[in-house]
Amino acid sequence: MGSTGTARRGAGLTWRDTEAREFMDAPDCDPDRLDRTYRQFDVVNRLVSGWRRIYRQHLRPRLDARRPTTLLDIGFGGGDIARALARWAARDRLVLRTTAIDPDERALRHVRGLPAAGVRFEQASSADLVARGDRYDLVISNHLLHHLDADALAGLLADSQALARGLVIHNDLSRARAGYGLYAVATLPFARRSFIHQDGLLSIRRSYRRRELQAVVPPGWQVRPMVPQRLLLTYEGATR
């Protein structure tokens, strides 16, 4: 959980605030605020995460109308990204089979009962899937990288390479003052009822800049900027 002192240290955004911890990650956080946060991810991601563009430019060209394409979403959170991708593929009459995983049982409880045609949600880690020998045509994540320390990041990238037959896209924030200020103002009305305001600001302070991320990933991984203030960490696996 973040502290006032940590917030002051990270406010300048010159350096990553690796000490900050998001409020929703605390096992004893308020369950009602947590559930509202999961629900609000849908709105926030539609506004700032750029997945519609990613789908059109990078994912849709790899899908097929007859042969199923498999996709793994690591750390699904509120489940909105996996569900949106499945919905867009269905509208385009393309066959996409999505597995969405998250190690947090609270995330799995949230998605139970939500409409999720073409998506299977599971409580698991990427390491669990590597251990059982799973492979997927596409592997993605959203807002995951900034949560991880150096060892966990290395593990995620190794797991992603082992799990992916083709493209991997880890989509995350890019730390910048403009985005921080806009987000602070836009989400202030939600500060009392969910964690979307406080944790979003913590996430920005924890996030990378392009050169920082490129410096810590293995060879073969590429960091691409995307508007507004996004980083796409991509890897192209072997052909299918």
Image: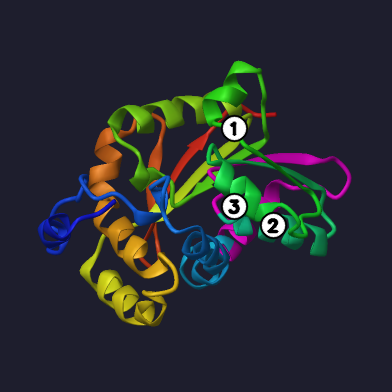
Circle 1/circle 3 CB separation < 8 Å: no
Residue position marked by numbered label 3 in the rendering: 58
Residue type, numbered disc 1: Ala
Q: Is residue 17 above or below residue 199?
A: above
How far is mark 3 from mark 2, CA to CA? 17 Å
Residue position marked by numbered label 2 in the rendering: 83
Q: Nearer the viewer, residue 123 or 33?
A: 33
Q: Nearer the viewer, residue 94 or 47?
A: 47
Residue position marked by numbered label 1 in the rendering: 124
Residue type, numbered disc 2: Arg
Residue type, numbered disc 3: His
How far is mark 1 from mark 2, CA to CA? 18 Å
Q: Is residue 39 visible?
A: yes
Question: Which residue is at a point 15% across and 64% down the rendered structure image?
Answer: 11
Q: How is the image coloured?
A: rainbow
Which is nearer the N-term, disc 3 or disc 2? Answer: 3
Question: Which residue is at a point 35% across and 55% down the rendered structure image?
Answer: 23
Q: Nearer the viewer, residue 20 or 65?
A: 20
Q: Is residue 51 above or below residue 43?
A: above
How far is mark 1 from mark 3, CA to CA? 26 Å
Residue 98: image quadrant is top right
Q: Reply yes or no: does residue 41 show up in magenta.
A: no
Q: Reply yes or no: does residue 58 show up in magenta.
A: yes
Mark 3 Cα shell of 10 Å, populated few (<14), some (14-19), many (≥20) = few
Question: Which residue is at a point 30% across and 64% down the rendered structure image?
Answer: 201
Quarter of the image that includes the C terminus: top right
Which is nearer the N-term, disc 1 or disc 3? Answer: 3
Which region is colored magenta? 52-77
Circle 3/circle 2 CB separation < 8 Å: no
